[in-house]
Amino acid sequence: MQHIISFSQVSFSYDKDNSIFKQLSFSIAPGEKVGLVGANGVGKSTLLKLLVGLEFASEGTILVKDTPVTKKTLPQIRKHLGYVFQDANNQLFSSTVFRDVAFGPENYGLPKDVVDKRVTKALSLVHMEAFADKPVYKLSGGEKKLASIASVLSMEPDFLIMDEPSIALDPKNRRNLITILNSLSMTKLIASHDLDFILDTCDRCILLSGNGIAADGNTSDILSQKDLLEAHNLELPLSYQYRAK
Ligand SMILES: Nc1ncnc2c1ncn2[C@@H]1O[C@H](COP(=O)(O)OP(=O)(O)O)[C@@H](O)[C@H]1O
Ligand SMILES: [Mg+2]
């Protein structure tokens, strides 16, 4: 199967007595929009960290395209992956929005005119052109989230990885983010406890439970199964709760 990423028999634990994943296998094909759901503490953030090489599997192989994720291959694989942190404050560190969004392409040694074009494009994709010269500390929570996404998009990743993107966003900013994500065509993996957000942004959904995958399939098929979700300490998305009654 053609894949952009694949996990094959991956095991991981932070400490000996507490296994997070045992022999986890799945793959994601180019263009898929995949939601990663599961109760708190089940390992969603950990799975993303394994993928971007912030943690390393104790067994098994993780491939990004055809390259295994190892310490040595990190510079290479990170060219393909755009990882949006859960907390935008951890992603943004420059004086202005422009400087933050320019940081990645500058770091790759791209010429100034190419960097400028990348920044303009990335900011326009998240409708933040007017904020280029604003100091980061003056941004609202929603604006920081969009700036952090732009700082990843300026690297032109094939694959966008997001950890709890809707957390701390008010309804208007949350809706705005959904519209923006749906306008971006690259492959996506979005970890979230916000099942309505996943329903609105992802066509495939992976439900994680202790040590592995409890369900993997069409998002609306999985997120409409009340019993399945409740068995994994989740609730039906709000948009299905009304229909179920
Ligand atoms: N750096 C760490 N060291 C030790 N345990 C951790 C660390 N990070 C997360 N954990 C534990 O690993 C489990 C999975 O965490 P996490 O991946 O953050 O879950 P989720 O994102 O699904 O809420 C939790 O029990 C958490 O307490
Ligand atoms: Mg998490």
Image (cartoon, rainbow, N blue to C red):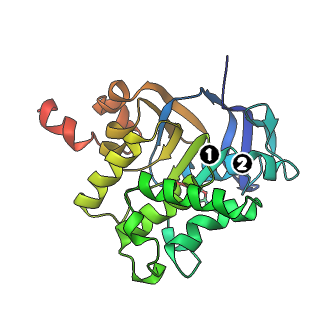
**Lateral position of residue 181 relative to residue 200, left or right:** right
Give the spatial CA distance, label 2 vs label 1: 6 Å
Q: Quadrant of residue 7?
A: top right
Q: Callout 2: helix, strand or loop? A: loop
Q: Residues within 10 Å of mark 1 (few under 14, many from 20)?
A: some
Q: Quadrant of residue 102?
A: bottom right
Q: Relative to 62, is 137 above or below?
A: below
Quadrant location, the C terminus: top left
**Relative to the observer, which residue lies in front, 38 or 162?**
162
**Relative to the observer, which residue lies in front, 71 or 150?**
150
- Given the image, on which type of amino acid does mark 1 rest? Pro
Residue 177 percent across, percent down from the top left: 35, 53
Residue depicted at x 50% and y 67%: 87
**Relative to the observer, which residue lies in front, 129 or 47?**
129
Please give the label number shown on residue 157: 1
**Lateral position of residue 50 relative to residue 153, left or right:** right
Tell me the residue that label 2 is attached to.
Answer: 79
Residue 173 percent across, percent down from the top left: 29, 60
Residue depicted at x 69% and y 50%: 52
Q: Residues within 10 Å of mark 2 (few under 14, many from 20)?
A: some
For label 2, being within 8 Å of ligand 1 is answered no
Residue 139 percent across, percent down from the top left: 39, 77
Q: Is there any visible trace of residue 162 in the rendered image?
A: yes
Residue depicted at x 40% and y 50%: 193
- Which label's residue is closer to the chain start, 2 or 1? 2
Tag 2–tag 1 contact (CB < 8 Å): yes
Q: Relative to 189, is 56 above or below?
A: below
Quadrant location, the N terminus: top right
Q: Is there any visible trace of residue 85 in the rendered image?
A: no
**Relative to the observer, which residue lies in front, 15 or 48?**
48
